[in-house]
Amino acid sequence: MKTLICDCNRTLPLDRPALARALSLTPGASADGLDAPHSLLCRREAAAFQRAAISTGLAAEPLLVGCTQETNLFLDLNAQTEGAAPVEVRPIHFVNLRETGGWSRDGALATPKLAALIAAAQLPDADPVGTVAYRSAGRCVVIGGADAASRAAALLADKLEVSLLLDRPGGALAQAHSVAVFAGQLTRLGGWLGAFDLQWTASNPIDLDLCTRCNACIDACPEGAIDFSYQVDLSACKSHRECVRVCEAAGAIDFQREPQVIEERFDLVLDLRLQPAFNRHQLPQGYFHAGADEARLIKAVLALRELTGEFEKPRFFSYRQNLCAHSRNQQIGCTACIDVCSAGAIRSDASLKGKLTGKSRGAVPGQPAPGAPQGQGGGVVVEPHLCVGCGACSTVCPSGAMSFAYPSTVDQGKRLRTMLTAFAKAGGQGAALLLHSQGAGSRMIDDLGRAARAERRNGTLHGVPARVLPVAVWHTASLGIDLWLAAIAQGASQVWVLLTDEEAPEYRQALGEQMAVAQAILKGLGYGDDHFKLIETRDASDLPALDAALRAPAARGVPRAASFAAQADKRGTLELAIDHLLACAPQPAETLPLPAAGSPFGSLLIDTAKCTMCLSCVGACPESALLDNPDRPQLRFIEKNCVQCGLCATTCPEAAISLAPRLWLADEGKARKAARVLHEATPYACIRCAKPFGTLQAIEAMISKLAGHSAFQGAAAERLKMCGDCRVIDLHSNPFETRITDL
């Protein structure tokens, strides 16, 4: 890939030879084009870009420009240059080297960071994934009072097919019957762009379809109970019924009409009520809540006017039910993905029957989850049309059943490793990865860089430090503990996440819990504290706080960077990272206690006085962490496989199992990968043939529970102590007693 960089009129310190050396040593990176000096590539040196576009276009090789300030200009130049390939054939990539790198007080030391940013930007785009399609014909419903709804309809009617749903009397409708008007109380709203299902109850005496808006009823009503929204205020109406008399010809008013439940489907929804219909952070695409806010209304109207036609988005997630630890046999275990989803896109697919634990949205204790067949168990269901691609579900998933698909964990891991490698090859030390969103997060970083540049002489802002590597991601919640620990193992000193108003409260809590687990692992291995941090910001007023947070000192890292690549399997990446961190640990420890919230690792505690070795926990374990022994009454356990879902504990009929979050690293981490015995019971031998057929504790418990039952007295009680074969033989040797027992 040919790369063009510019020192932006000599305001950006660029050591081109050092950059070229670092990139030539970084696998997959290229130093082609870095030797050409440019100071005003977007102005008087624009011809250099055009020459690169022509030569690169012939080879269909991507081109990288080290500037985001003039992205549109370069794209226009490419389109106007004869012989240059269109961007659909030869992509043009852009990377911000100015605000994120050179425009800081230590910009002269930023060469390793610039090498890292360039190397990451040179990586090919992630492989495409399947898409989710939406189709909108422009049928839009506006919900609210007559005045506000009519005004909004006027702004939309030339582009959309608008209907009004008036949820209260008051205000005035336009006299011209130009849009469909309904009146009633909204009782249900669900769906997404192109498929919103609304249900409302219409109980007003005036049928707005039949109403001609002649206003005779308004004149006739002695109480003034009818206004120009053409609804009757029943609290003011005194049953004079003059309105019925004057409307006799049209027949629009009927006080005897039963309330009607009406259902309609719309493509778009504009909600002008004070409270939104959805109590969640991420609203469905195609739904806009403006309330009484004028600015939000204008913004919503502008967006709605463009939402007709067919739309696509990536299918952001990948789900493997065979790894899911949500449910087994109608028992609920892990609900992490359901709890964290701020879009309400994930629901349980287990038949709950009152056994729900956790905070699963859309599931009612004592009832099956929506859409779940009775009597069946399963995992979770993700509605791709509601998914906004935050990736938080993959971050909190302990088993790796839910993963972020675009870009994949492999692609994200390769990007981070490439940045850290290039940074180190250029002589950088103490790299801190700053994960931020492509939207508000990028704007905050750019604002800080520009503000630091403006205050270069007399200000206090430092700008983005030379050791801080900004990493723009689709959503900050899409990267979790597996890639964080992998980055530390691959040479990062710290991993920070920049949060803005884009992040839901659920994400902040989940990221905080995952960081607590990751930090506990590093601290337990002797690396100390301060490797992970959430940096919370709102707007430009928070720039001083952001600037101060980015100047935190480096934390202790590994003496030797790992070379492994991130795996598609989350647990596989975690194991590789932990093995390397353990091998380089300053103070190795055998057992690292972990926080209970969000821990993907741990052991089990068995109350041996309660456990009857029924082994129901073995059947419930979705990860094969619990095993039996065909030859002996043993409960065995592979700690590496345990995801702390709790299904074994909820399944155990004796309540003999409890979770113990920890990371067990005995024998250099090998012990947790081998099966060990958690509990072993004394076999119970058949009193007739002496063959073991159960455990002493289980048989004694059964005898104790059936001791008072009339069918298990005398010889029948003795048969409880026999194996299945001997029990049948004994029954047939005493037919009279068999009949009594059968009775």
Image (cartoon, rainbow, N blue to C red):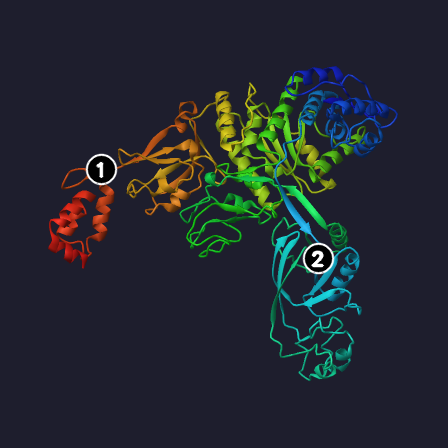
Rendered location of residue 358, percent (x, y):
48, 49
Residue behind mark 2: 139
In this picture, residue 77 sits left or right of residue 737 = right
Q: Marks 1 and 2: CB-CB under 8 Å?
A: no
Return the disc, 1 or 2, that comes first in the chain's sequence: 2
Rendered location of residue 730, percent (x, y):
13, 47
| Type of amino acid under label 1 | Pro
Q: Quadrant of the C terminus?
A: bottom left
Q: CA distance from mark 1 to mark 2?
A: 71 Å
Residue 411 or residue 97, whichever sits in front? 411
Rendered location of residue 292, percent (x, y):
73, 58
The answer to whether residue 265 of the structure is visible from this angle is yes
Residue behind mark 1: 683
| Type of amino acid under label 2 | Arg
Q: Residue furthest right?
A: 44
Residue 347 to residue 599: above or below: below
